[in-house]
Image (spheres, rainbow, N blue to C red):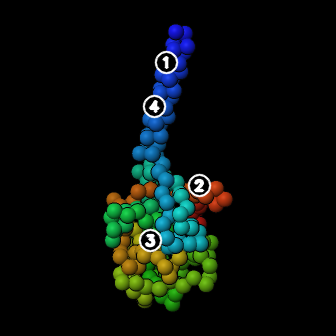
Amino acid sequence: MEFLKKAYYFLLDAVQTLLVAAAIFLVIYVFLFRPFQVNGESMYPNFHNSEYVLTNLIALRFNNPKLGDVIVFKAPPQPDEDYIKRVIGVAGDTVMVKGGNVYLNGKLLDESSFLSPSVKTYGGAFLKDDETITVPPGDYFVMGDNRPYSSDSREWGFVPQANIIGDSFFVYWPLNDLKLIFNPYN
């Protein structure tokens, strides 16, 4: 009888521990941090297909995304999909693509800390070459780091603030690619 009593208390303790762990995980997942998988090559070479990034959900409640932030958002052309891209323009900024380069507010944007000098950026259906657009209030202009192979704001336009899920800050899988994600303009 003593054995059954010990087994009962052990199981009760194990169930309580699992419930507490699940509750903590749920709070973290819903309110603080969420994992996202990079799908495709649009952010190559800085992010690779099938990498997992941890995204901060709460930071954007207090601060808006800034130039250079890597964000996860509901894709304007496909709202059921999440995209990961880099912020190139915020409200009030002017963006132009000319001669394979990006110009922000009339000045050549220095992207050398995250892009190879050989990477050229050309216009798309929304932002054509030699055309200047102004980012409206509450919207963002984003681009993938792999410019020739990225579906981004050049093709489908601005990302509304309401579509933004969070700010990516850590690559945690695979373990050999473990790294913090830094904003090159901070």
CA distance separating discs 1 and 2: 38 Å
Secondary structure of the residue carrying numbered label 2: strand
Q: How crowded is mark 1: few (under 14 residues within 10 Å), some or many (20 or more)?
A: few
Tell me where residue 99 appears, x and y as whole percent: 51, 90
**In front: mark 4 or mark 3?**
4
The part of the image, by quadrant, that contains residue 74 is bottom left
- Mark whose residue sits in front, 2 or 4: 4
Q: Nearer the viewer, residue 70 or 79?
A: 79
Identity of the residue drawn at 38% across and 79% down: 155
- In the image, what residue type sits under mark 2? Tyr
Secondary structure of residue under mark 3: strand
Residue receiving disc 3:
142
State the residue position of label 2.
172
The amino acid type found where label 1 is placed reads Tyr
Q: Mark 1 falls on what kind of element?
A: helix
Q: Name the residue under label 4.
A: 19
Please rate how many residues cluster around mark 4, counting C-alpha atoms within 10 Å: few if below 14, some from 14 to 19, many from 20. few
Is the Cβ of the residue at disc 1 closer than 8 Å to that at disc 2? no
Closer to the eye: label 1 or 3: 1
Residue at 59% x, 55% y: name it.
172
Percent across and percent down for residue 32 are: 46, 46
Which numbered disc flags the more N-terminal residue, 1 or 2? 1
Q: Earlier in the sequence, mark 3 or mark 2?
A: 3
Pointers 2 and 4 in contact (CB under 8 A)?
Answer: no
In this view of the protein, which residue sits in the foreground, 158 or 90? 158
Residue 74 shows in this picture: yes
Hey, which residue is sitting farthest right in the picture?
176
Residue that carries the numbered disc 1 in the rendered image: 8
Quadrant of the snapshot with the C terminus: bottom right
State which tag comes first along the sequence, 1 or 3.
1
